[in-house]
Image (cartoon, rainbow, N blue to C red):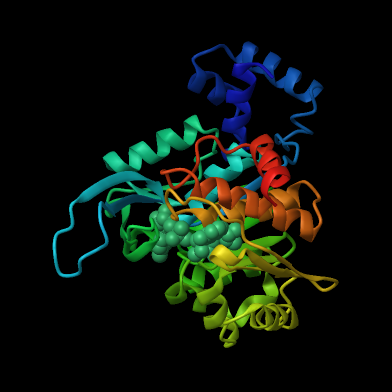
Amino acid sequence: MTYREKEILQILKSNPLISQQELADMLNISRASVAVHITNLMKKGQILGKGYILRKENYVTVIGGSNMDIQGFPNNPLVMHDSNPGQVDISMGGVGRNIAENLSRLNVNTKLVSAIGNDLYGNTILSECKNLNIDVNDCFVSDEYSTSIYVSILNDSKDMQLAISHMDIIEKLDETFIHSKHKSIDDSKAIVLDTNLSKETIDFITRNHSHLPIFVDTVSTAKCVKIKDILHKFDGIKLNKYEAETLSGVKIENLDDAKKSCEYFIEKGVKSVFITLSGDGVYCANKEKTLHIPGVKIDIVNATGAGDAFMSGIVYGFMNDLDIEQTAKFSVGASILALSHKNTINPNLSEDLINKTIKELI
Ligand SMILES: Nc1ncnc2c1ncn2[C@@H]1O[C@H](COP(=O)(O)OP(=O)(O)O)[C@@H](O)[C@H]1O
Ligand SMILES: O=c1[nH]cc([C@@H]2O[C@H](COP(=O)(O)O)[C@@H](O)[C@H]2O)c(=O)[nH]1
């Protein structure tokens, strides 16, 4: 496709009923040129018929939070109630946005539906996402709220000790807004949600797009409870040990407990469940199989973002028809690469690098 054809397709996606003259005016070209581009797009199979019915694309829609992450790394063991000398880094975060970035780096076409403020951080997030090839046309930009912020303090082992997420803006992703994006969400091959979204919005999405595979990342013990009564709506769920304990009520002290917790989710109707166990790897299950992939000993540079990288591995596995074991290994590989870089997302993440990591370590 030419650049102009891509531009026209993009406009048609958000406004399939636009006239050729309106398109011509928007692009500052003649109506006759628009007609030629549209004929060519029809020949190429990108437009299927009148009223501009577009070819169904292979893309994933991620609906969730986008944050600016401010992370403090102490030089020495943390001293509570004191100011600790160290480093402070600012980077893009938010579980939904992190998953979208990882997916895009893994060559999965990705649309992000999120809420950001009309401010410096918000504009940075939008332009960086565009550079990463993430479709952000359906993001909500607010003049009322500022871009959400996550502040965390890590310990000297680079593990998060405490964090606060200030994400009031997420309430802008309400039922009315999500409804206005119905078509583009419904055209995706799969949906990924994070529990930053309100309970009402999660219910609305799972009700209105129930014919699509829906994956969920539970985010935190405080936020995971929103999905307790609708577990059967999900094709895939990724939880860490604490979130799994909160939802299943099974205290996880060993691998047997992790297995029991997995079984709880399968009994509740989740199609596949992945309970990540930090240094102990992952326990996962579907109706046919339950298995444990052990953890790998590595030097951790920054533990933030390992779970989000893991989640993108699960979605990659779905998009590439991997079985549960291949998916779990791929996801562990993705999380190891996240842990090995100081940024929340490893900028070197790629399918090749994950496959190489699996061969060497898993
Ligand atoms: N200390 C560690 N050593 C090795 N791998 C780890 C470690 N911590 C996390 N991982 C990897 O990252 C994945 C997700 O980490 P986990 O801490 O369970 O989730 P979250 O980051 O969502 O809290 C794990 O399944 C594992 O593959
Ligand atoms: O309530 C929330 N806490 C944290 C995050 C995001 O989660 C990421 C860290 O995840 P983890 O601690 O699982 O590595 C950060 O990018 C942070 O912005 C979020 O979206 N919502």
Task: Give the quarter of the figure containing the N terminus.
Answer: top right
Is residue 132 placed above or below 296 in the rendered structure? above
Asked whether 180 or 188 is in front, the reply is: 188
Asked whether 31 or 179 is in front, the reply is: 179
Does residue 303 appear to the left or right of 277 in the view shown?
A: left
> Does residue 285 appear in this view?
yes
The tally of labels here is 0
Does residue 298 appear to the left or right of 173 in the view shown?
A: right
* Residue 113 drawn at (x, y percent): 51, 50
* Residue 346 drawn at (x, y percent): 50, 41
Asked whether 306 or 98 is in front, the reply is: 306
Residue at image location 63% in from the left, 29% down from the top: 9
Residue at image location 70% in from the left, 79% down from the top: 259
* Residue 91 drawn at (x, y percent): 36, 44
> Does residue 113 appear in this view?
no
* Residue 80 drawn at (x, y percent): 20, 69
Quick one: which residue is furthest to the right in this view? 288
Is residue 360 placed above or below 67 in the rendered structure? above
Image quadrant in which you'd find residue 125: top left
Ligand 1 falls in which quarter? bottom right
Residue at image location 65% in from the left, 76% down from the top: 231
Residue at image location 67% in from the left, 48% down from the top: 361
Quick one: which residue is furthest to the left in this view? 82
Is residue 163 placed above or below 14 in the rendered structure? below
